[in-house]
Image: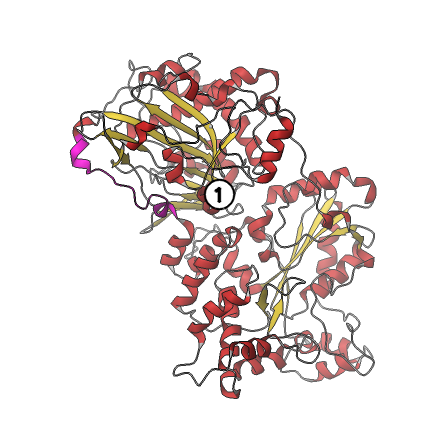
Amino acid sequence: MAATAVRTAESSYATNTGVDTHSLFGDLAGGSGRIPGATRPRRTSSIPVAVTPMVDNRMSGIHGASIQAGVIHGSVTVHSLPTMPVPGWVGTALPVHQCDARELGAHNALPGSKGAGLPPYVVRDVDGELDRRLAAIAEAQRGGLVLVAGASTAGKTRALVAALDRTVPDRMLVAPPEDADLRPLPAWLQERAAQAPRGWVVWLDDLDRHLGASGLTPALVAELGGAGAVVASTIRRDQLEALRPSTTDQASSSEGFGYAVLKTPAVVVERRWNPQEREHARISGDERLIRAAADERFGVAEQLAAGPLLEPIWLSGPDSGHPRGYALVAAAVGLAAAGLSSGLTREQLHAAHGAYLPDPPPLPEEADQAWAWATRQRSGLAGLLVPVDHDGHRWRAFDYLTPQSPLPDAVWHTALGMATDQDLFSVGLTAYNADRDDITEAAMTTFGDDFEGIEFADPADYAHLLTPESTMCWWCQTRSATTGEHKFKRTNLARLMGDGQALVWGDGEQRREIRGKSGLKRDRYDVIKFPKSMCAPCNNDASQPFDNAYDTYAQYVETHLLRIMPGIDLGEVYGTRWRKKSLDLARYHAKHFGCRMVRDRFPVPQSLRDFMDGAEDMSDAHMVIISTDSVNKSYGQGMSISPTVPSVSRDMTRFTSCVMAAYIGPIGIRYEWVADGIPDHERDQFFHHPGPVINYFRNEKDMVMGETRKPGRLARFLQWANKP
């Protein structure tokens, strides 16, 4: 019988204002435990149906897990999962006192009569405070983070490097690249503790460029502290203001969201040097410092870095025969101001520079001539565009250059199109603080594109199939429904929120804040829980083992780097009781999916109730572990609820199937119910295997249709290496 699919979705989001990138986004919308690679024939006769909207909740920012695997034929058992290879930058650590400030990010200085190189360090007023903070976190059992903020070329990096050399000169310093994931770093450092008897320093210059990829949260800073490491970081003040969470002060009128580590109080290095600092420069004996200290229009460090020299050269570009060169640099400056921290290729900058050509434009120079002008080093220091990599493939603007305000619309939209997975959240945050809600929503929600081209049925045609609202518990069907199940466990929400923090929820038209643990309990905006559909005995005592199994699993997924692995070792998660605990984990999801069905007035299958009552299988349903590329791109460091997509027969006489999923980061549990049953050879439940594989999808449309993709190369190798 031909069938049509039903879709439920609401575009909404919420975010944690104080824990990393934790964001609640609106409800949109497997084992072995595998899904056959080809779409089953019944799918071709099904049409999506748009049912009553679901409440959609997405949370970003858990430094969690995902697993890469795709179409797996045959049973694959994962034994002990291999450890990740240690990157080279861990093995090249140096003692702090041997580190060169230029290698750590300090700007080069104008050469003097005695040659190039950095001048001697000049005492700054912040030195005492930096020494106190570094000494304190070096002694603290949980370590900590020292954050130094200031304008470009204020002297942030020199000041922090000098403070490290004074306070912890014998610690070993590691400097991760901008795209490094730092979540495995505590284990790597602990394994090499003998190499660092005085401990470690994790160096993160321009911290904003590390935030997307690193997974850095207050919890990870504490884990690094447990491994004997302190974190030393710098950030420009404008980036700090754009990306850090707003205060949770009730009187605040500009509530926002952001990266929780940026709530660390910063030591601010001022660009303009005060009289005492200038006097220190004058008596330094270095001609460059003496000359810079005499010109009070600019800071000493910014003059040494040639910032005041480079900016007028750039701004005069259109009038000096280089309008295209000016526009190329302006595009790099503007895209960085929009939240793009990754380096950009010449082709990307050329594609974006049109928004900055003067109007009416003078005759622009040839592209090669413009590129040469923009990248040429001035005074032996830097060009207006500086290379990010050794090959000169990616570039960014010299960070002293300031963007025009407000940013042109074309630049915002170009930033969205060019954003990497790591940049997307930062673009959304920057747009949020610039009151560009359209860009914020586009950066934070990408669900709609996943389902482009699908035919959805008219809700009026299947309204008669929806179940009437009931006041009875849908599980036991004997007691009144007096409680609402949390869409995500309250313990998960509390971990995201942290002490005294807040979640921000929105649907594109309005934003709501959920403040403190009491706000989670009150749920005044009805976004934390499903509507009341269960009795207290069923939702509490009867399902407590399910909740406990889920909490253990959730903490494992949140704290392990799993995305490139071929599966999850449930034996490692649960120990010798993995069989029972895995069933309880599946039953937790059965309860979650049942509550979603009741809310959407979809008839709950009896097999779901029987499974929760103790049955060990469901002949008409299938649960598998999944990972979805589009979910990982937008919400890979969080939690999310997928669309609910049932199907209805084309004659509109019955529902024929239903698919839904719930994710922790990019790792989810997919549930599929089929009215006519699922053959045994296609019903390979994840909870029957100690090492279930992950079924991988490109997007949520493929997830609904069951169209898996191949795993990555490393995952395929590990599957081969671990096969029985």
Q: Say if the magenta span includes residue 215.
A: no
Q: Residue 250 at what x, y percent from top left?
A: 43, 50
Return the residue nearer the eye: 15 or 70.
70
Q: Amino acid at mark 1?
A: Asn
Would you say 285 lies left or right of 595 here? Answer: right
Question: Could one spot residue 561 in this view of the protein?
Answer: no
Q: Quadrant of the N terminus?
A: top left
Q: Residue 638 at what x, y percent from top left?
A: 49, 41
Q: Residue at x 44, y 31 (%)?
A: 37
Q: Which residue is mark 1?
A: 632
Query: Based on the displayed image, in which of its 4 quarters is residue 162 positioned?
Result: bottom right
The answer to whether residue 448 is above or below residue 557 is: below
Q: Residue 11 at what x, y percent from top left?
A: 33, 45
Would you say 680 lies left or right of 690 here? Answer: left
Q: Residue at x 41, y 69 (%)?
A: 408
Query: Based on the displayed image, in which of its 4 quarters is residue 191 positioned?
Result: top right
Return the residue nearer the eye: 548 or 33.
33
For mark 1, does the 10 Å Cα neighbourhood hold few (<14), some (14 to 19), or many (20 or more) residues? Answer: many
Q: Quadrant of the C terminus?
A: top right
- SS label for mark 1: helix
Residue bounds of the magenta highlight: 446-463
The answer to whether residue 429 is above or below residue 269 is: above
The answer to whether residue 615 is above or below residue 69 is: above
